Amino acid sequence: MHHIQTQKALRKKLLSLYFEANAGHIACSLSCIDLLIALFEIKTKNERVILSKGHAAAAMYTILNSTGEINDSTLSTFYKNGTKLSAHPSANSFENIPFALGSLGHGFPIGCGIAYANKLQKNNENVFILMSDGETNEGTTWEAAHFAVAKKLDNLMVLIDKNNLQGFGNTKDVLGETAAKAKWESIGFEVIEVEGHNIANLIFGINELKSKKNGMPKLIIANTIKGKGVNYMENKLEWHYLPMNEEMYKKALISLDENYNA
Amino acid sequence: MRNEFSKKAEEIISSNTKSVFITGDLGYNALESIQTIAKERFINAGVAEQNMVGVAAGLAYKGYETFVYSIAPFAVYRCFEQIKIDVCIHNLPVYIVGNGGGYGYGIMGATHHAIEDIGCLSTLPNITCWVPAFKEDVAYCLIQITAEKKPAYLRLGLGKAYPEQIEISPINQIIKAKIPKITIIALGPVVHNVLEAITENDNVNLFTVLRIPMIKFSEALEKSISETKKIMVVEEHVERGGLGEHILSFLAKKTITKLEFVSLHAKGYPSKLYGSQNFHQKESGLDVENIKKELNKLFAL
């Protein structure tokens, strides 16, 4: 399937999940779903994508539904009592969801542990950690960043979904540019900045970066748009939280058809 | 107990290549030989406890049993959420080792004391807390911890040797009176104060509890409680969430009636003054003299 068709199809699936569940965090998932599409095209079976921005769980569930790991009937339980698919990922249910995440700042240290273990096992696996830009406010981000550099974890790649909005304001206004390229380079990360909604570019960038076994951990700053693909949600803080009513849902689907017209 | 710990940990690290040792930049004059033996399986994670526990969870997920070492307060409180979510919820074999539990770091001050550690951790799923009382208990606890392969916390202190060697178990009877009148249950090395307080006494049964949560009372402890009906718990831990409350929750489910129960426990900083471990024990009434005094009161009841 052409990437644009995948982007549209998975977004439609994602919106249907949120609509059925009457749930929020829609824009957060739309912001990073392209990163997940690219990562799941690249990663090998044993490699893990740690969704540290756990509030985008629905995007991960949608991807795992497309790969067959989460079947349709399980997917339809999203948000319901008795589900394995809570709003933030829960533990011990799916191979590609190895950790419960959702309290920000946990995925990066865990990823460092996995990367260190991969080094001990000499297995050539990478670990990918998907973070939000707001999450770089967390102190553990900086503990883990220095750890990754000091321990030369060049099999570790952090992807920052840089949509410039966080829970209650613009990222630059809250704690400043904690996801700035120069900051991470000065610590010792090998950094590239990419447009975060172009799958081909993302795949190229991730592949190029991960091939560099030079002792430096990697960072992709993906410039993204919160709510990408649904015009009325794009760059709007409120869509971090709001659920859609039926009218909004229909409008969102029309928006996707217009924006992803291959 | 730090030396007993590092000696046993060396054995474990050298015999199990799927073990990793992480320190939060502590262990001078204690962990050097582990570092030498473990090579790349020894990690100094720096002064960054939250990351250290997350890293341990990642390693454990990939099949490594992981020790995480710091002084007790730093190993527990700063990284409590990492212990809860990353380690306990996933039931991973991460072993938190806290040196100097209780008032162990004495004059270092309140930042360096851990008098709420067991209470905090014992609310979490899957984790077992181990509190050695005598120095020989350390190796026993480590054997249990590595056999269980699940989250664990080991609280180290200043332990002396057993007065006479016993077969160690999660609950141990240290002193067996001919005609027992009082049952004392102690947590950790504060048991040495109890031993000193009862030297002239021949009707006290003394027990230590190494494992919290307890699975059940030992037969001997249950018998002693029903015979004496007078219990004293001594612990260098606050009352909330400590051994005393733990014992009471067990007793509530039993039919032993008319019990006298005394809890001697850490009281924080009642005079707002600071000093050695002994000073703080005295402030909390955990010193030899006060234990004697409380025992006499209990005998008189």
Image: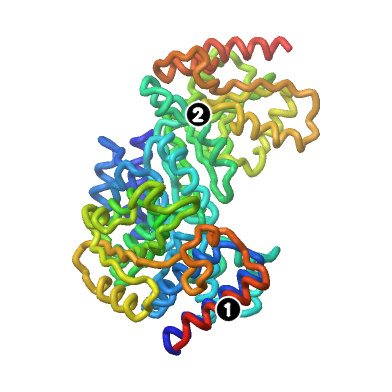
**Residue B139 position in % (x across, y down):** 42, 42
Q: Quadrant of residue A70?
A: bottom right
A233 left or right, relative to B66: right
Image color mode: rainbow
User: Which quarter of the rendering shows the N terminus of chain A?
Assistant: bottom left
Q: Amino acid at mark 1?
A: Leu
Q: Quadrant of residue A68?
A: bottom right
Q: Check residue A14 in the rendering and tell me which mark sits there, or answer none.
A: none
Please indicate, yes or no, whether residue B178 appears anywhere in the rendered image. Answer: no
Q: Nearer the viewer, residue A161 or B156?
A: A161
Q: Do badges 2 and 1 share one subunit?
A: no
Please give the residue where the numbered disc 2 appears in the rendered image: B115
- The chain under label 1 reads A
Observer able to see residue A13: yes
Q: Is residue B149 above or below residue B301?
A: below
Whether residues under marks 2 and 1 lie with C-beta atoms below 8 angstroms apart, the answer is: no
The residue shown at (38%, 62%) is A162
Residue drawn where x is 63% and y is 29% of the image: B244
**Label 2 Cα crowd, 10 Å radius (few <14 / some 14-19 / many 20+):** many
Q: Viewer-nearest of labels 2 and 1?
A: 1
Q: Quadrant of the C terminus of chain A?
A: bottom left
